[in-house]
Image: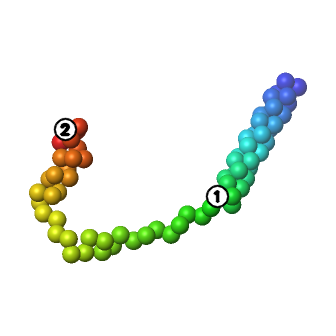
Amino acid sequence: MKKTTIRQSIDVLHKIETIEEQIQDLKLSVLKELLPSQKSLISLKGILKGIEISDSDIEEAKESLYSKADI
C-alpha cells in the first residue's frame, strides 16, 4: 500500500513537471508574438571604403581598449 502511494506521488510530480514545461513553452511563444520583430541587420561592408588603417592606428586602438589589462 505504501509503494502505491509513493508511485502515485511520483506520477503526480511528473505530471506537474510536464505542465510546468508546457507553461514555460507557452510563455515563450506568447512573448515572441507580443515583442516587435527585430529590424533587419545593416551590413557594414564597405563602410570604411577609401580609408587606410596603419599599424600605428591598430596599436593605438589596442592600447585604448586594453589599457587596464596586462597584455
Residue 60, label in figure: none
Residue at the top extreme of this rendering = 2
Answer few, some or many: residues within 10 Å of disc 1's Cα (few below 14, many 20 plus, some between 14 and 19). few
In this view, 47 is above or below 1: below
In this view, 44 is above or below 63: below
Marks 1 and 2, how far apart in space?
Answer: 42 Å
In this view, 3 is above or below 27: above
Please state the horizontal and vertical placement of residue 21, each as a whole percent of the image: 71, 46
Q: Amino acid at mark 1?
A: Leu
Is residue 8 in view from this perspective? yes
Residue matched to label 1:
35
Q: Amino acid at mark 2?
A: Asp
Q: Quadrant of the N terminus?
A: top right
- Horizontal side, residue 44 vs residue 66: left or right: right
Please state the horizontal and vertical placement of residue 55, each as a whole percent of the image: 11, 60
Residue matched to label 2:
70
Query: Which comes sooner in the sequence, label 1 or label 2?
Result: 1
